[in-house]
Image: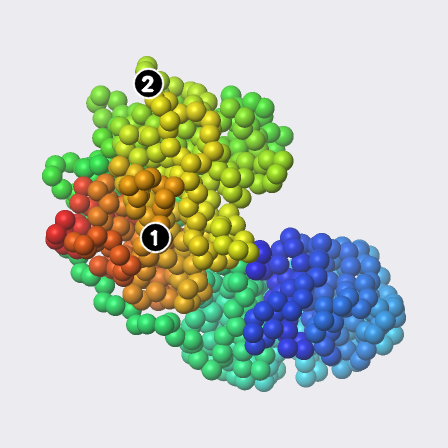
């Protein structure tokens, strides 16, 4: 899909309807998954319900009735601003509430107002209809019971807590849940029946099935006896971020509850809370809906998933036994950052004796500006660092940036310093990207160059230079990617730009002045002709060749598929760099939508081999990923032929194989990160090592597979060890980041004895 899907989908007339944030509504065939229709929807919110083949959607200041089969908008009804009010449908009336203190009852066929109930406090709740009455909460902690046909007030029930979730009703009871407690009151009178210390959470709705009440809570998903309020079970920490907070409700069908979590979709026995199966694809972002033996949800990777509820769908091939490795070294940050991103970016000297690790969300000066930890090896080998003894490099102050953005206090919270890191061959120069810094306003970006003093790296070391674009713009995120030549004389920086022709990108090249690095603008701007920011960059050892990847580009294949991706080769003419366009554009002849070819890339010292990751590649399974290796022909890159294909022998859906790549200086070893491999197993991610056969590179699977020695971490972005997000090869050492856990060093001699 063309964007994220936060809101619970609905199913009607053979269509699963989803809302794509900042875009619109899309209907997919429940069998084929193909788009049947789409409708523009301007509001950020889309609370949906379906009845009799019609989808009723509310958000912004309106409610619409849309034919589920055709996408025809049957009617539009204007309201005040709506918050969390999923429409309710019963007996020919659609009910929706707004923050403007009104509950609207609208004719289901015509969209004409039947009646309106107004109060002194706004409604931030979904209405529920049962037994001829409609129930809704208003701000201030009052539950209202109204005659569903006329809107006449039947009774009101006030509670101490002013913040309650949407009610539920069934079997003569109405259920009220807050952040602290749950009530049940008699539907006929509003008199209390029972109270339970089982708090709900996040403006979610409740589901009632077979006498059990299911709802999202702050510590998991709860099931309580609907008649007595007795707790039955609580399952894990699920729903706290996924589904709750969007007016969603847990999905329950045929005795199974389907619960989204940060490590996938869980199918749980609705009676006991025991796990039946788990689907470890990219995590659900929306709550799920289960209909006729299929469960649907929008996932974090911007795809809609449809799974058989009978059992988990197995991955194509069994996972091979990971290659045992002796002498694994573990580097750890001394303090964790806000999101546990230590290890998302790594760089190393040629001999592997100096390693820099970015932690772009680490707190400094009470702001999450980020740091870079520099580890130096003492003696011939590394020893485990259970506590970091690394030197910490920090972003300099930003007080001199001009012009100062109006929203400076907010945007200065984070500069993303350390989200990209590069190092010269001798370990004496470290380049750090800070794409959210402010030289030209919000997210314009900067790059900082640190040089090692004679006495070695020292904490508090100030950067020797700050590099910026001469014509920087807001949101260009200069410093998204950085690279430096082996001799430390040439630095390349990836950036996005906004041009008259649309969103593009550029690579900025900086040549070291004779007197050493100092604050400066670019020596040359290299313009990539494709769409999107330059997401990855690499530089040859002598600085004469620069390569940039635009993973959002539309590629070369006809018709141009969105986000197929392209890679651009720039070559220096003469002794110095000058502004230019690419010499060669590399793209896959069969590039497919969302391949994201160019998301990662590396080149050899002599620029004779370019390795490119395409983590969104879908040859045999969704987002399994692939890596392509290009060798330079004798006539030059303009004559480049079909690349070699590197894949994982156990490749499966959503592995994101190719999210990071590394190549040895001679081009005979390639390491590939697959950050989501086995995502649901508790030991997410893998690194695959490829050794060049004696006859040269050819299509191949891995020589060895490395898995996370420490298992999954608890402090990472997605809740599991994202092992393989950043890889490197240096001095016979393979370096693999597991953000939120550690950076691991593997001795490559035990994997590839020939090398």
* Coordinates of residue 126 in the picture (x, y in percent): 70, 66
Visible residue check, residue 32 = yes
Left or right of 412 in this view: 123: right
> Which numbered marker is on residue 192?
none
Visible residue check, residue 275 = no
**Residue shown at the point (67%, 66%) measured from the top left:** 37
Label 2 Cα crowd, 10 Å radius (few <14 / some 14-19 / many 20+): few
SS at mark 2 in the image: loop
| Vertical side of 564 occupied by 466: above or below | above
Instruction: Judge by depth and name the residue closer to the eye, 385 or 612.
Output: 612
SS at mark 1 in the image: loop
> Which of the 4 quarters of the picture holds residue 318?
bottom left
**Residue shown at the point (44%, 63%) measured from the top left:** 618
Residue furthest front in the image: 635
> Which numbered marker is on residue 643?
1
* Coordinates of residue 448 in the picture (x, y in percent): 40, 28
* Coordinates of residue 754 in the picture (x, y in percent): 12, 52
> Which of the 4 quarters of the picture holds residue 72?
bottom right
**Whole-number angstrom distance, CA of label 1 to CA of label 2:** 39 Å
**Residue shown at the point (53%, 44%) measured from the top left:** 531
Q: Where is the N terminus found, in terms of image quarters?
A: bottom right
Instruction: Judge by depth and name the residue closer to the eye, 40 or 147.
Output: 40
Residue furthest top in the image: 515
Left or right of 370 in this view: 190: right
| Vertical side of 641 occupied by 507: above or below | above
| Vertical side of 197 occupied by 459: above or below | above
| Vertical side of 216 occupied by 420: above or below | above
Label 1 Cα crowd, 10 Å radius (few <14 / some 14-19 / many 20+): many
Coloring applied to the structure: rainbow
* Coordinates of residue 691 in the picture (x, y in percent): 21, 54
Residue occupied by mark 2: 516
């Amino acid at each position: 899909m063309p964007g994220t899907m936060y809101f619970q989908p609905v199913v009607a007339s053979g269509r699963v309807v989803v809302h794509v944030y900042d875009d619109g509504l899309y209907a997919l065939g429940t069998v084929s998954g193909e788009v049947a229709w789409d409708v523009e929807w301007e509001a950020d919110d889309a609370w949906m319900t379906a009845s009799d083949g019609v989808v009723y959607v509310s958000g912004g200041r309106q409610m619409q009735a849309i034919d589920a089969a055709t996408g025809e908008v049957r009617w539009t009804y204007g309201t005040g601003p709506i918050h969390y009010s999923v429409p309710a449908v019963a007996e020919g009336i659609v009910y929706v509430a707004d923050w403007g203190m009104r509950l609207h009852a609208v004719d289901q066929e015509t969209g004409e107002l039947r009646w309106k109930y107004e109060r002194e406090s706004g409604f931030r709740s979904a209405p529920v209809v049962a037994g001829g009455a409609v129930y809704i909460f208003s701000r201030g902690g009052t539950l209202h019971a109204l005659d569903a046909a006329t809107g006449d007030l039947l009774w009101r029930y006030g509670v101490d807590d002013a913040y309650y979730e949407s009610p539920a009703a069934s079997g003569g009871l109405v259920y009220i849940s807050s952040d602290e407690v749950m009530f049940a009151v008699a539907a006929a009178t509003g008199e209390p029946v029972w109270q339970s210390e089982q708090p709900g959470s996040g403006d979610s709705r409740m589901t009632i099935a077979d006498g059990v009440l299911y709802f999202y809570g702050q510590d998991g998903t709860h099931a309580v006896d609907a008649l007595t309020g007795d707790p039955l079970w609580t399952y894990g920490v699920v729903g706290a971020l996924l589904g709750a907070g969007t007016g969603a409700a847990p999905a329950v069908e045929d005795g199974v509850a389907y619960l989204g979590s940060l490590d996938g979709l869980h199918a749980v026995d609705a009676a006991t809370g025991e796990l039946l199966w788990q689907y470890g694809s990219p995590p659900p972002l929306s709550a799920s809906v289960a209909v006729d033996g299929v469960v649907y949800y929008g996932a974090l990777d911007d795809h809609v998933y449809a799974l058989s509820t009978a059992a988990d769908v197995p991955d194509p091939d069994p996972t091979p036994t990971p290659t045992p490795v002796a002498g694994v070294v573990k580097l750890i940050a001394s303090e964790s950052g806000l999101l546990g991103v230590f290890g998302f970016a790594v760089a190393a000297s040629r001999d592997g004796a100096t390693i820099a690790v970015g932690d772009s969300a680490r707190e400094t000066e009470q702001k999450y500006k980020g740091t870079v930890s520099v580890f130096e090896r003492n003696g011939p080998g590394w020893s485990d660092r259970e506590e970091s003894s690394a030197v910490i490099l920090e972003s300099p102050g930003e007080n001199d940036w001009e012009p100062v953005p109006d929203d400076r206090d907010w945007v200065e919270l984070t500069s993303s310093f350390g989200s990209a890191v590069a190092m010269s061959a001798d370990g004496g120069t470290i380049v750090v990207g800070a794409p959210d810094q402010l030289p030209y306003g919000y997210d314009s970006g900067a790059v900082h160059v640190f040089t090692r003093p004679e006495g070695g790296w020292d904490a508090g070391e100030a950067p020797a230079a700050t590099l910026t674009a001469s014509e920087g713009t807001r949101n260009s995120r200069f410093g998204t990617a950085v690279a430096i030549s082996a001799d430390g004389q040439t630095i390349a920086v990836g950036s996005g730009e906004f041009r008259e022709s649309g969103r593009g990108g550029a690579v900025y090249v900086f040549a070291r002045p004779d007197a050493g690095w100092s604050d400066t603008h670019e020596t040359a701007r290299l313009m990539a002709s494709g769409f999107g920011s330059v997401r990855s960059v690499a530089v040859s050892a002598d600085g004469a060749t620069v390569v940039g990847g635009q993973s959002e580009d539309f590629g070369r294949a006809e018709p141009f598929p969105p986000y197929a991706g392209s890679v651009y080769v720039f070559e220096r003419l003469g002794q110095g760099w000058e502004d230019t366009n690419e010499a060669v554009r590399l793209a896959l002849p069969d590039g497919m939508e969302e391949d994201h070819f160019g998301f990662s890339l590396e080149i050899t010292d002599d620029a004779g081999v370019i390795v490119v990751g395409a983590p969104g590649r879908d040859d045999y399974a969704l987002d399994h990923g692939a890596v392509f290796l290009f060798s330079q022909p004798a006539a030059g890159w303009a004559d480049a032929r079909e690349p070699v294909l590197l894949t994982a022998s156990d490749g499966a859906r959503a592995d994101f194989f190719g999210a990071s790549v590394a190549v040895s200086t001679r081009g005979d070893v390639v390491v590939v990160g697959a950050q989501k491999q086995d995502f649901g197993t508790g030991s997410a991610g893998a690194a695959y090592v490829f050794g060049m056969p004696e006859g040269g590179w050819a299509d191949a699977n891995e020589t060895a597979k490395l898995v996370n020695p420490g298992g999954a971490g608890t402090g990472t972005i997605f809740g599991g060890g994202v092992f393989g997000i950043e890889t490197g090869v240096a001095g016979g050492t393979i370096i693999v980041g597991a953000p939120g856990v550690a950076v691991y060093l593997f001795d490559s001699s035990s994997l590839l004895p020939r090398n």
